[in-house]
Image: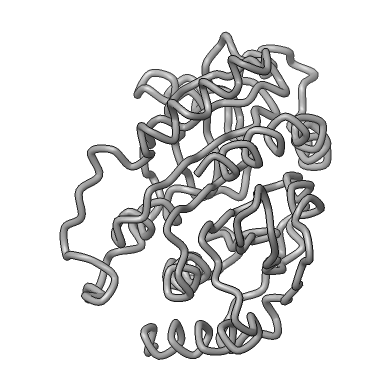
Amino acid sequence: MDILGIIHAAADYLTQRLEGRKPEIGIVLGSGLGKLADEIQDPLVIPYGEIPGFPVSTAIGHKGNFIIGTLGGKTVIAMQGRIHYYEGYGMAQVVLPIRVMIKVGISRLFVSNAAGGTNLSFHVGDLMIIRDHINLLPNPLIGPNLDEFGPRFPDMTRPYDPGLIRMAEKLADQEGIDLRKGVYVAVTGPCYETPAEYRYFRQIGADAVGMSTVPEVIVARHSDIPVFGMSVITDVAHATDDEEYVTDGEAIVAAANAAADKMTFIFKKMIASL
């Protein structure tokens, strides 16, 4: 697969469709978090299926569109739904949208997801700033290095930008919004975690678990793009102690939707402040 050719063809197509708009900020909207897209003014909607070489999102709550417009006074390009490894796509396809957004000119990336809370103090509906991650997915940089994007061995000391984290904490404090902060572990999915897996993730230092985000962050950092990440906690580990408990995908999307207003407010305020 000529991955560079696919990236360039998709970026060229998007550039033509943008008609002179130059996105500054990339945003990835995860399960049930597409509400932020409704806040984007003067939107141009481009379905993934119209873009040459692009995979199509099939996950619950993922509409599969790029939305380009204005948010917080900045031109943004938002992924209304992402591509997951568990959908059967190779990792090059999973991160293709991020590399295309980099080619069209973004200088920062905001990522969001719905996650299970492995930290026993977390509750459904909590918002967690991602301060670090543990990657249990295949690394998207495996294979020949794409030198035009970044070095063979990129630094991952600070995958999530400390300045953006401080900005989010300050804004949330001013507005009386409670935020958690923790480590996100990325797994393949698509099945939800067993109680034993929840305990394992907690023991290795994870506060939340999900099936996405980290590959996107890795390729953004490969290109030295600052990243801010936030998880909505949509189910919690201690719930699995109940023998009647069943993890339900529809309930997870509903919980993400319920928390979306707070996340939308924080993202908008941060983008406006940049």
Residue 41, compared with residue 17, is above or below; it is above
- For the N terminus, the image quarter is bottom left
Q: Position of residue 96 (x, y in %)?
A: 48, 72
Residue 206, compared with residue 15, is above or below; it is above
* Identity of the residue drawn at 38% across and 57% down: 220
Q: Position of residue 224 (x, y in %)?
A: 29, 56
Residue 15, compared with residue 119, is above or below; it is below
* Identity of the residue drawn at 76% across and 45% down: 32
Left or right: 26 in relation to 31: left
Q: How is the image coloured?
A: one colour
The residue furthest top is: 121
* Identity of the residue drawn at 71% across and 67% down: 64
Quadrant in the picture for residue 2: bottom left
Q: Position of residue 130 (x, y in %)?
A: 47, 32
Residue 171, compared with residue 163, is above or below; it is above
60 vs 78, nearest the viewer: 78
Q: Position of residue 19 (x, y in %)?
A: 64, 84
Total labels: the figure holds 0
Left or right: 110 in relation to 62: left
Left or right: 63 in relation to 224: right
Quadrant in the picture for residue 22: bottom right
252 vs 5, nearest the viewer: 5
* Identity of the residue drawn at 77% across and 62% down: 63
